[in-house]
Image (tube, rainbow, N blue to C red):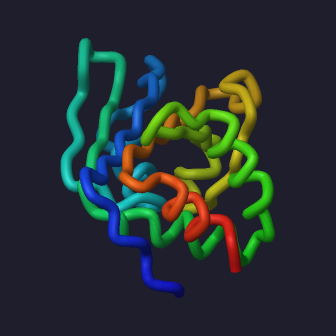
Amino acid sequence: MKRPPQCSNFRLTVHTHINQTESPAKLETALKRIIRLSTTLVERQSVLVGTTNQVESLSIVYEQVKSRRTASVLRRMLINNLDGNTTSFLLNKQAAAAGVVALIDRESESPLGALRIQIQCQPIQQLIDWLTYN
């Protein structure tokens, strides 16, 4: 794995809705299978939020995007969702539970909802290049 870029003010946040049929603890475990989170908490008893300040937390996403050859798809998503030094992308929640990084364009593509990953980094372009170039 290529070394991740040096980002100042790096912050990654994951948001996902907790369905009535889902266990918050199992959902937290699913999140941690693909992103190494520092903290997690349940907001309003229906949203799980995880955060980290470590660029290395994206190493599993990095590895799977390379091995599954979906870097160009992730690059498109990151650039389309770019807003200043912040960008985001969506992952399939069910796939994450199995430890698989499956990119989706819309929340409706994931029957149980999506994982919304928001990344803040300065300079953001170096992070995008690291995640999506060989």
Q: Quadrant of residue 49?
A: top left
Residue 74 shows up from this direction: yes
Residue 62 percent across, percent down from the top left = 56, 69
43 versus 91 height, above or below: above
Residue 26 shows up from this direction: no
Q: Quadrant of residue 15?
A: top left
Residue 89 percent across, percent down from the top left = 59, 40
Residue 54 percent across, percent down from the top left = 28, 63
Which residue is painted at 51% across and 35% down in the image? 116
**Observer-nearest of 11 and 39:** 11
**Observer-nearest of 29 and 16:** 16
Which residue is painted at 43% across and 41% down in the image? 85
55 versus 31 height, above or below: below
Which residue is painted at 70% across and 80% down in the image? 134
Residue 43 vs residue 14: left or right?
A: left
Residue 109 vs residue 81: left or right?
A: right
66 versus 27 height, above or below: below
32 versus 3 height, above or below: above
Residue 88 vs residue 9: left or right?
A: right
Q: Quadrant of residue 7?
A: bottom left
